Image: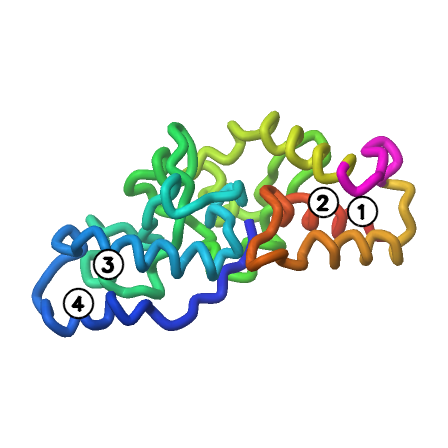
């Protein structure tokens, strides 16, 4: 996961809330929902809030970090909404109303959840393990491995020799992966950044 820094909510959403003070998220019209989602995708540099797969406005959904059933008072809080992929059996689709331990808004999501070149994911704390379980991120091992390998080969590196890179080269690789191009990061780039950071001696 990659920490998300929330910004100001879209003006369309603000205007709608002012005109509908007693409404629920379920009352929110489609154009306002899309405006929220696009704003979230921009904040997330084009990545799903949980798995870090590339997403667009048409293949993602608005995700309430504090779910609407248990926290109805937060259903129209922009600071509680992110964008998630819509793929079956993972992320928002799998989570439903399960509690997450570490929010992608929390910097701990980058330090308490670790990844390996094999595609394996591991939670270092109970909160991290709760998030991994609630979003079914363990099931994406092969997908992560394939995308991470593609990123490595695309950079001209051999995955088997990655652990032999010196720290200066690792830092350059991290900086390249963590630099958005046209406002987006490569799919799974934060996963590889996490792996590279763990390889530094």
- Crowd class of label 3 (few under 14; some 14 to 19; many from 20; radius 10 Å): some
* Residue 65: x %, y % from top left: 35, 53
**Disc 1, disc 2: CB below 8 Å?**
yes
Which residue carries the number 3 mark?
A: 32
Q: Secondary structure at mark 1?
A: helix
Q: Residue at x 53, y 56 (%)?
A: 45
Q: Residue at x 70, y 52 (%)?
A: 177
First in sequence: mark 1 or mark 4? Answer: 4
Q: Is residue 97 left or right of residue 153?
A: left
**Disc 3, disc 4: CB below 8 Å?**
yes
Which residue carries the number 1 mark?
A: 199
| In the rendered image, the vertical position of residue 155 relative to residue 145, given as above or below | below
Q: CA distance from mark 2 to mark 4?
A: 42 Å
Q: Which mark is residue 195?
A: 2
- Crowd class of label 1 (few under 14; some 14 to 19; many from 20; radius 10 Å): some
Which residue carries the number 4 mark?
A: 16
Q: CA distance from mark 3 to mark 4?
A: 8 Å
First in sequence: mark 3 or mark 4? Answer: 4
First in sequence: mark 3 or mark 1? Answer: 3
| In the rendered image, the vertical position of residue 94 relative to residue 57, given as above or below | above
Q: Which residues are magenta?
A: 154-162
Colour pattern: rainbow
Q: Nearer the observer, disc 3 or disc 1?
A: 3
Q: CA distance from mark 3 to mark 2?
A: 37 Å
Q: Is residue 60 magenta?
A: no
């Amino acid at each position: 996961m990659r920490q998300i820094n929330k910004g100001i909510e879209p003006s369309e959403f603000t205007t709608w809330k002012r005109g509908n003070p007693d409404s629920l998220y379920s009352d929110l019209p489609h154009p306002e929902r899309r405006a929220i989602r696009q704003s979230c995708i921009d904040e997330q540099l084009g990545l799903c809030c949980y798995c870090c797969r590339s997403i667009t406005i048409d293949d993602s959904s608005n995700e309430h970090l504090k779910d609407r059933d248990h926290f109805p008072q937060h259903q129209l809080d922009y600071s509680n909404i992110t964008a998630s992929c819509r793929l079956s059996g993972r992320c928002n689709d799998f989570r439903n109303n399960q509690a997450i331990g570490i929010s992608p808004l929390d910097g701990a999501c980058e330090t308490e959840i670790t990844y390996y070149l094999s595609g394996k994911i591991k939670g270092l704390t109970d909160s991290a393990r709760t998030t991994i379980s609630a979003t079914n991120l363990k099931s994406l091992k092969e997908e992560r491995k394939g995308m991470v390998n593609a990123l490595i080969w695309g950079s001209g590196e051999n995955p088997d020799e990655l652990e032999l890179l010196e720290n200066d080269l690792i830092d350059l690789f991290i900086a390249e992966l963590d630099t958005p191009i046209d406002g987006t990061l490569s799919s799974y780039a934060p996963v590889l950044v996490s792996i590279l950071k763990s390889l530094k001696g």
